Amino acid sequence: MARPRILDQKIMLKIAKKLGKKNIVAINGIVSNKASKLGISAEAALILLAKEHGIGTSTYQRNLDVTKQAEVRDALPSIFAPVRATNHASKIKNRNETKPTISKKASLKLAIEYLIEDQELRSRCQDILMAFANFDRPINQATLILEDRIRKKALPTKKIVGENLVNHAFNEEISKTVLRVASNDPDDQRGFTQMLRGIFAAFAIKHITIL
């Protein structure tokens, strides 16, 4: 027997308020229709519906099993992907339709949540990715997180940073390296090491001009 679905009533009440509904009965129907249309669970459909209306679902989403969380991630692009009219008739129809409730800012937030799965990286970068300027700052934060994780795994005996830390932790030859790629493939090890060196060498420079 299938496990009964568990929908968060607080989230459903918030959606009902957004949609001007008196209770959550109508929301149940909307959730079921979305779940059927997208081929996902009702729990995942509820989260997507909430996100469309700018309602937070992080606690509820974290408590779902990994399968349902994956359903949410896979279906998120359907929310923030732009809809393009294919012909003149559909353009006219789109003008007459009510604008979607999701704002540009909410759409960007959803895109960030979809593209950045790492929780720490997302929490450190999300607000600055949504800013109006200084877009180099998220890259700076991302490299700091990467550097910290390399340091914690490699455990150098003295404080080293940036490219020096990469050179300490990674060697292109697997037999000489402190940290190695999971595949244990020499080509993967060489490529990954070169990539890390390039990242730290590039982003240690404050201003880069690309010709």
Image (cartoon, rainbow, N blue to C red):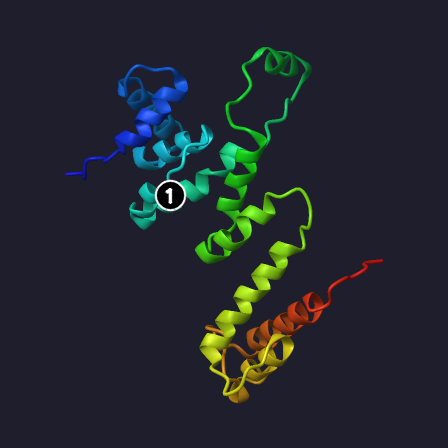
Q: Circle 1 — which element?
A: helix
Position of the N terminus, as image quadrant, is top left
Give left or right: position of 90 versus 79.
right
Residue 31 shows up from this direction: no
Q: Residue at x 55, y 52 (%)?
A: 125
Q: Residue at x 50, y 52 (%)?
A: 122
Q: Position of residue 199 (x, y in %)?
A: 65, 67
Q: Amino acid at mark 1?
A: Ser
Give left or right: position of 106 versus 191.
left
Image-quadrant location for residue 144: bottom right
Q: Which residue is mark 1?
A: 58
Give left or right: position of 176 versus 2.
right
Q: Position of residue 54 (x, y in %)?
A: 46, 31
Image-quadrant location for residue 61: top left
* Nearest to the observer: residue 128 or residue 80: 128
Q: Residue at x 27, y 34 (%)?
A: 8
In this rendering, is residue 88 above or below 83?
above
